[in-house]
Every structure is written in C-alpha cells, then in structure tokens.
Amino acid sequence: MGQTFEISGTSLSLVLYAFQLVAILLVLGFVVFPLDSSATVVLGLLFGVVALAVIFGVWRLATGRDGGRHLGTTEDITYDPFADPGQAAKDRWEKAVRRLPGRDDDRD
C-alpha cells in the first residue's frame, strides 16, 4: 500500500548539474551583460568557461564516459585501505584465518 519514490545517484547528479548550469547562465545573463567594460568581458569569459565545464560534465555523465573513478574506490590514487581502521582490521582477520591449521595456503 505504501508508495515509494526512488532517485538514483546518476539522475540526482544530472539534476544538480542542471541547476548549476541554470544558475551560471542566469549570472552570465544578468550580471555580465551588457559587456560595457573590460571587467565584465573577463567575468563573462570566466562564467562562460565554467558553463562549458558543467556542460562537458553532464555530457560525460550522460554518455557513461565518467570512468567511475571516484574518491574511495580502488581506482582512486589516494585510496589507502589501511588508513581505515575497519579495513585494516578486516585485512588482519583474513590473514589470521588464512594461517589457521588445515589450510595449505601460505600467502601473507
């Protein structure tokens, strides 16, 4: 009887990108234009580059070319499983189980 409403992480990030793009374009439209001084031209270029970066990010996410390299995954170069005490304890436990009698696996 209960109704559920689920939002996936991909669709939520697409909505976030869309809100960012709308906000950047609104700033670009109301603050930067008309281009009457050199400061507004530079500001327009800055916001234009940011808008292009957001559009590029949405395109990569929508086409699946994001690569899946996110913080905390094994593809992350800063990933250190031993920095997490739970992960280090799990690794020590697995090493102790492998050393139990009756096992012929001597890996460390």
Image (cartoon, grey):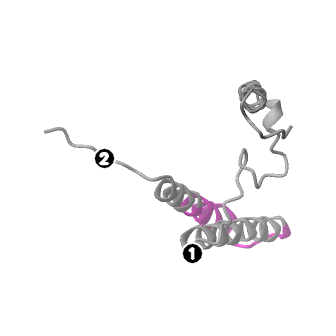
Amino acid at the residue labelled 1: Thr
Q: CA distance from mark 1 to mark 2?
A: 25 Å
Q: Position of residue 54 (x, y in %)?
A: 65, 65
Measured along the vertical axis of the image, is residue 19 above or below residue 71?
A: below
Question: Please, what is the dominant secondary structure of the magenta stretch?
Answer: helix
Amino acid at the residue labelled 2: Phe
Which residue range is magenta in the image?
Answer: 21-38
Q: Which residue is mark 1?
A: 63
Q: Position of residue 88 (x, y in %)?
A: 78, 29
Check residue 24 for magenta coloring: yes
Rendering quarter of residue 100: top right
Query: Which numbered tag is attached to residue 77?
Result: none
How would you rate the neighbour count of disc 1 (Cα within 10 Å): few for under 14, some for 14-19, many for 20 or more? few
Q: Which of marks 2 and 1 precedes in the sequence?
A: 2
Q: Which residue is mark 2?
A: 5
Q: Secondary structure at mark 2?
A: loop
Rendering quarter of residue 47: bottom right
- Between 15 and 22, the residue placed more toward the observer is 15
Instruction: Please state, as top left, top right, bottom left or bottom right, where the N terminus lies in the image.
Output: top left
Instruction: Please state, as top left, top right, bottom left or bottom right, where the C terminus lies in the image.
Output: top right
Write the residue at 69% across / 72% down: 52
In the image, farthest residue toward the left:
1
Q: For this view, does 68 lie left or right of residue 42?
A: left
Check residue 28 for magenta coloring: yes
